[in-house]
Image (spheres, coloured by chain):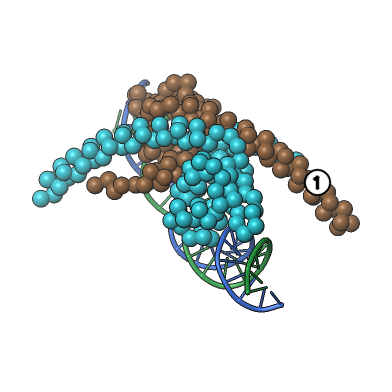
Chain colours: A brown, B cyan, C blue, D green
Amino acid sequence: MAVAVPLYQAKAEFFRMLGHPVRIRVLELLQDGPMPVRDLLSQIEVERSSLSQQLAVLRRSGIVTAVRDGDTVIYALAGGDVAELMRAARRILTDLLAGQQDLLATLREAEKNELAKST
Amino acid sequence: MAVAVPLYQAKAEFFRMLGHPVRIRVLELLQDGPMPVRDLLSQIEVERSSLSQQLAVLRRSGIVTAVRDGDTVIYALAGGDVAELMRAARRILTDLLAGQQDLLATLREAEKNELAKST
DNA sequence: GTGTGGATTGAAGAATTCTTCAATTGTACA
DNA sequence: TGTACAATTGAAGAATTCTTCAATCCACAC
């Protein structure tokens, strides 16, 4: 059973699972501890059913768990050190964004030249 | 210019950029140092133009750089500690996969019960 | 120049993922 | 029981991303 998935494919799926703004925000919020859907909803600008859809993605991947407490459902990180991952990502992102600033400057120059030519 | 992108959206795009098996393998291979396309091609099972497409995605994001050396093109990590990110991801993934083993066992049990009922 | 191998690009169709809305489930409470 | 609120689910269409193939570009050798 459990057809062996190559590790690099599991990794790709994992990162793809992270690749959505709402899901990122949920994971970040949950780093401060478990939180009911109601609170997630109040801090993330998204419709309720949209949030539910993204929570379902996170649940399916196993990175969060949900327990029902009467009226409300409470989500929590399933384990693992998500914070560490986020820190590592942020470090790389900072580098990349800095790089893109340079790129943008370059592009703006190129654009100016184009405009100069076209007049 | 450079319309301000919310950070959580930049993060999501970053992770989405990682979310492809070929791109993961490229990044892993490049951790041992710069490498010509030819070598990437020999170690990843994918067609040349497919690899090029994925390399283009990585280049656009800025996480790798490419320089031409005569006949061949050599790729390298652009900076930042990708290895650290991969380690963090692997740690979480290990947890998740372990969790899924449990899940699978549970599912198999459920399945057995279903079968028992259906006979 | 012509030809060849390495690599990238463009474009079309297939496949995934997102968004949104209506319908549904589960709990509480009168 | 009926109503109200919290949350999830299913499904359809829109939007992205993947895959693949042909065309192109670039350096090198003849």
Q: Is residue A38 visible?
A: no
Q: Nearer the viewer, residue A61 or A108?
A: A108
* A72, above or below A54, in the image: above
Q: Residue at x 51, y 40 (%)?
A: B31
Q: Nearer the viewer, residue A10 or A37?
A: A10
Disc 1 element: helix
Q: Residues within 10 Å of mark 1 (few under 14, many from 20)?
A: few
Q: Is residue C27 left or right of residue B13?
A: left
Q: Is residue A15 visible?
A: yes
Q: Quadrant of residue B95?
A: top left
Q: Which residue is mark 1?
A: A109
Identity of the amino acid at label 1? Glu
* B52, above or below B101, in the image: below
Q: Position of residue B44 (x, y in %)?
A: 45, 53
Q: Position of residue A79 (x, y in %)?
A: 38, 27
Q: Residue at x 86, y 57 (%)?
A: A118
Q: Position of residue C14 (x, y in %)?
A: 45, 63
* D22, above or below B52, in the image: below
Q: Residue at x 76, y 44 (%)?
A: A106
Q: Is residue A41 left or right of residue B115?
A: right
Which part of the image, by quadrant, shows the N terminus of chain B?
top right
Q: Quadrant of residue A61?
A: top left
Residue furthest to the right: A119
Q: Residue at x 40, y 31 (%)?
A: B91
Q: Nearer the viewer, residue B20 or B82?
A: B82
Q: Position of residue A95 (x, y in %)?
A: 63, 34
Q: Nearer the viewer, residue B64 or A71?
A: B64
